[in-house]
Amino acid sequence: MNMRMHGNSPFFKQFRLADSFLNSPWAAPAVLFSACLIAYLNSFANNFLLDDHIVLFGQQGVVHKSFFQIFAHDQGGDFYRPVGHLPLWVCSRLFAGHVLGYHIFNFLLFFLIVFLFRKIVWHLSSDKPLAFWAALLYAVHPINGFLVNYVTASIIATFVLCMQGSFLYFVKFSDTAKKSDYALSLILFVLACFSHEIAVTLPVFLMAYLFFMKRGQGLRPAQFVLPYFVFIVFWFMGRMHEAAFHRRLYNIFSLGHIKALALVSTWMNLTGWYLSKLFYPVDILFLWSRKYGLDGFFPHVIVLCVLSAAFLYAFLKWKQGWKPLMLAVFLIGFLPTFLTCFGSMPFVRPFIEPHWFYFSQIGFFVMAALLLKAVIRKNAWIGGGLAAGVVVLLIGCCWNYNAQWKGQETYSRYWLSLNTGNLTPYYGLGRVYMDRGDYSKAAHIFETGYRHLHVLDLDLAADWGHCLDVLGKTQKASDLLYTAKLMGPRSAITEYYIGLYFLKRGRPQLAKQAFQKVMEWYPDNHWNMSLN
């Protein structure tokens, strides 16, 4: 039944009333907030896990740093994200070790992301109901649950919010030519880059905006986007002194000797997994690893060709306007993935993380909202039922996903049940058994992860060495602790374990030297009793 015939039905009138309701200034935000709250209500009781313990409470964690130290030092030698760490620093002062406060704070950041995405889509499309549906789908899709469930995900939320703000102010500047809007856009872009590395893609989104929305209006991308790229050059040069950043670049450039076909195949596998979770939102992980190789190459090529043809058809049909822009935003999100997927090779398996797409995937949810609106206009009963069913189903998936974040053991086991290609869940589960005093089980899990992946990092080497020391396996323990010391010469936990190692073997002077180093590097620790 077409819209003209169906337009006077009671249901369709109710739908038009619903559209009017969502056009009010307070109704849509209230509904979105309620939907977010319902979707993530069972996440507030979840505990700290995995990187939370390191980034928050570790030797170089934010709880041990002053405001200025956040900017003066990187985070544990791996990342320099001072702006991203500021919310954690504030929360650590407000909530200390009470996890509920962190979850509530993350929830509010997440709702703000949802609210701003509604504002962006509404501004671009002038379609308030569409903006509402796109934001609602984004809010209740479990692939975004990482932002609420993982305490340290406030780093990611900060980068997304800064990108949203920078994009919005650039759009305002393109409409009003106010220099203050342009300055705010640049400032927020700088803050985004110091929150997460993926933010450097923002200038490409801005160029897409100018191309699809302002083409022929005299706004030249080279003139207005060039300063963003200039900053990226200086940002890139400034990061070169970081050992981890330099190592990742070296790993990427060293891929030249690896077969290009296998690289492409692995990339398609990884991006295919991410895309599948947008449509089938179960068994989601915040990091998915894949074995390097040609597995599933031809099926993925077929899917890639079909999707490419569909996207090309859409661009040729729409040509200009907000629809092709939203599609372009979604596709641009994949640009950095070929580098990021392989940045840690050959030391770990290639991987993909859904939070790389938390800004760009709004394009997907806009397309999904367009489809829902088209079905509703075709048949209000079917469309309305479909929209309600999708939202309820996604909320159910969210609740199931939130439950997996209950604690470190639960999430580590969940991770290992789906994917064994990364060291993190092995280490996380081993730490759970260490905390319980079951060193034999912990050592077994550490060894399993090492033998499966042939990867050994500082934390695993130190903890595994300590477990073996407790179990009386002297030589292997000594080898691992020595390896850990080479990896991190100023690691307090490694030095503490070395002190215990010497103390157990009747060498108190060497033990005391190790403990004194711990006190020097980590003066507010709880291990000082060992000096007695």
Image (cartoon, rainbow, N blue to C red):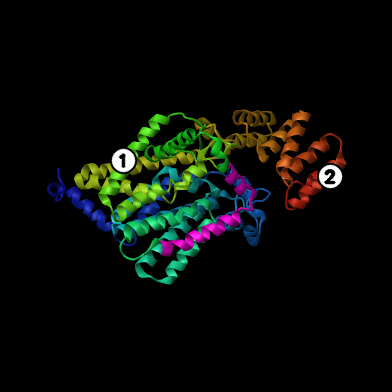
In this rendering, is residue 178 above or below 49? below
Q: Secondary structure at mark 2?
A: helix
Q: Is residue 106 left or right of residue 35?
A: right
Of residues 242 and 17, the one nearer the viewer is 242
Quarter the N terminus occupies: top left
Measured from the top left, where is residue 222 in percent x and y? 42, 62
Q: Which residues are magenta?
A: 222-251
Q: Secondary structure at mark 1?
A: helix
Q: Is residue 418 left or right of residue 132?
A: right
> What label does residue 469 carry, if any?
none
Is residue 391 shown to the viewer in this render? yes
Of residues 316 and 6, the one nearer the viewer is 316
Figure quadrant of residue 498: top right
Q: Is residue 241 magenta?
A: yes
Q: Is residue 218 magenta?
A: no
> What label does residue 309 carry, if any?
1
Main secondary structure found in the magenta portion: helix
Of residues 507 and 201, the one nearer the viewer is 201
Q: Residues within 10 Å of mark 1 (few under 14, many from 20)?
A: few
The residue lying at 51 percent from left, 33 percent from top is 259
| Amino acid identity at mark 1 | Ala
Q: Is residue 144 left or right of residue 406?
A: left
Residue under circle 2?
A: 512
Q: Residues within 10 Å of mark 2 (few under 14, many from 20)?
A: some
Measured from the top left, where is residue 398 in percent x and y? 42, 42
In this rendering, is residue 292 above or below 90? above
| Amino acid identity at mark 2 | Lys
The earlier-in-sequence mark between 1 and 2 is 1
Q: Nearer the viewer, mark 1 or mark 2?
A: 1
In this rendering, is residue 30 above or below 487? below
